Amino acid sequence: MTARNIRFEESSSKNGKRTVLVVDDEDLVLSMVYEILKDDYNIVRTNSARDSISRIKQDGDISCVVMDIKMPDMDGITAARRIHEENSELPVIFHTGYPGDYEEDEIDRREKPYEYVLKGDSISRLTRAVKRAVEHYLLKQKYRRLQNQISRVNFRSHQGLS
C-alpha cells in the first residue's frame, strides 16, 4: 500500500446525522434542547448524570455531550470527568442555569469543557457551540484514523529493509 492508496472513511452515523447526548434533570430543558437540535442531530436524552456515563459506554456514535451541571444524582462536573475516562476526546458542553453557583474560570481551568453555555443565553450560542464541538470531535477522529493509516503504511514500507 502506497501513500496514494490511503483511503479515508468517515465513521458511520444514523441517517447522516451525528448524535448528541443531552443530560439535564429538568424535563422541560430536555424537551427544549431536543426541539432546538433535532433537525441537525440525533438526540439522546437522559435526566440522570449517572445514566449519561452508561450511555457513553454503550453508544459509540455520540459526538458531543450537552451537560447540566447541577443535578441531584451526580453533578455534571463529576459526570464529565467519568465520561472523559471513557473517551477523553468527547467534547462536553456545560449547560447551566446556575452561573453564580460555579466559577466559570475555575471550571474551564480544571475541567476543560469544550464550552460553557448558560441556559439563558441565545439559542444560537448553544447551536453554534454544539456544531463546533461535533466538527471538532469529527476532525480529531479523522486525524487519529489518518495517523493510524500512515503508521501502517510506514511500517509496511520499511518491512524487510535492514
Image (tube, rainbow, N blue to C red):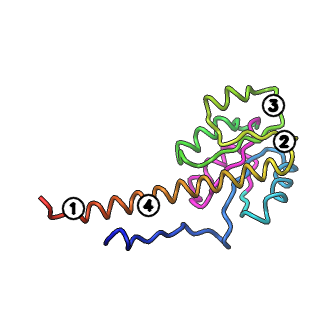
| Number of other residues with Cα within 10 Å of mark 3, as a class: few under 14, some 14 to 19, many 20 or more | some
Task: Calculate the distance from the C-alpha at mark 3 to the C-alpha at mark 2.
Answer: 9 Å
Q: Considering depth in this image, is 83 or 36 the residue closer to the camera?
A: 36
Q: Secondary structure at mark 4?
A: helix
Q: Which residue is mark 3?
A: 99
Q: Are marks 1 and 2 in contact (CB under 8 Å)?
A: no
Q: Are marks 4 and 2 in contact (CB under 8 Å)?
A: no
Q: Amino acid at mark 2?
A: Lys
Q: Which residue is mark 4?
A: 146
Residue range of the region highlighted in magenta in the rendering: 45-70
Picture coordinates of residue 154 (x, y %)? 29, 61
Picture coordinates of residue 79 (x, y %)? 64, 40
Q: Are marks 4 and 1 in contact (CB under 8 Å)?
A: no
> Quick check: 47 left or right of 16?
right
Q: Considering depth in this image, is 114 or 87 the residue closer to the camera?
A: 114
Sequence-wise, the earlier of marks 4 and 2 is 2
Magenta segment: does it hold 19? no
| Number of other residues with Cα within 10 Å of mark 1, as a class: few under 14, some 14 to 19, many 20 or more | few
Q: Are marks 3 and 2 in contact (CB under 8 Å)?
A: no
Q: Considering depth in this image, is 98 or 4 the residue closer to the camera?
A: 4
Based on the displayed image, in which of its 4 quarters is residue 95 positioned? top right
Magenta segment: does it hold 66? yes
Quarter in which the C terminus is drawn: bottom left
Sequence-wise, the earlier of marks 3 and 2 is 3
Q: Residue at x 74, y 37 (%)?
A: 69
Q: Which residue is mark 1?
A: 158
Q: Residue at x 83, y 51 (%)?
A: 124
Q: Which residue is mark 2?
A: 119
Q: Amino acid at mark 3?
A: Pro
Picture coordinates of residue 141 (x, y %)? 52, 57
